[in-house]
Amino acid sequence: PSAYHEFDRKYSTKMERQSRRWSSILPLAKDGLVVFPPPNDRIKKALRKGIPRDLRPMAWFYYSGAQARQDGEPKRYVELVRTAQQNI
């Protein structure tokens, strides 16, 4: 097999493992929404080992603290967009 096929085979295995790990960590809330648990040792280890591609944007938004900042200032984003549009 080519180098690409070999890489893809190994990477696909890794991605499957990530998906299984994260599906055991994240319960689904009502309406199929993902509920991220607060960081603990298990979550930190899972973050270091990788986040499945479909969860990555939402997970980083939550675990980077951006979600908490947005929740703390719900109107701030709209204000920033309005200010940016006025400066164009």
Image: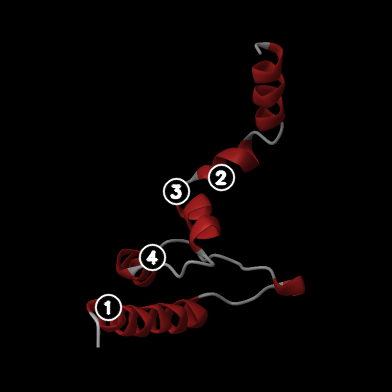
Residue 40 disc label = 4
Q: Which residue is mark 3?
A: 64
Point out the tag, 1 or 4, that comes first from the N-terminus: 1
Q: Looking at the image, is 28 positioned above or below residue 87? A: below
Q: Residue at x 51, y 80 (%)?
A: 23
Determine the image quadrant of residue 76. Answer: top right
Q: In the rendered structure, which amino acid carries the disc numbered 3? A: Ser
- Mark in front: 1 vs 3: 1
Q: Residues within 10 Å of mark 1 (few under 14, many from 20)?
A: few
Point out the tag, 1 or 3, that comes first from the N-terminus: 1
Determine the image quadrant of residue 11. Answer: bottom left
Quadrant containing the N terminus in the rendered view: bottom left
Is residue 60 toward the left or the right of residue 8 in the image?
A: right
Determine the image quadrant of residue 81. Answer: top right
Q: In the rendered structure, which amino acid carries the disc numbered 1? A: Phe
Q: Are marks 2 and 1 in contact (CB under 8 Å)?
A: no
Residue 3 x/y as whole percent: 22, 78
Farthest residue to the bottom: give it. Answer: 1
Mark 2: secondary structure: helix
Q: Looking at the image, is 61 positioned above or below residue 16? A: above
Is residue 23 toward the left or the right of residue 18 in the image?
A: right
Mark 4: secondary structure: loop
Label 1 and label 4: CA atoms lie apart by: 32 Å
Q: Which residue is mark 1?
A: 7
Q: Looking at the image, is 76 positioned above or below residue 55? A: above
Label 2 and label 3: CA atoms lie apart by: 9 Å
Q: Residue at x 60, y 67 (%)?
A: 35
Q: Nearer the viewer, residue 83 or 39?
A: 83
Q: Which residue is mark 2?
A: 68
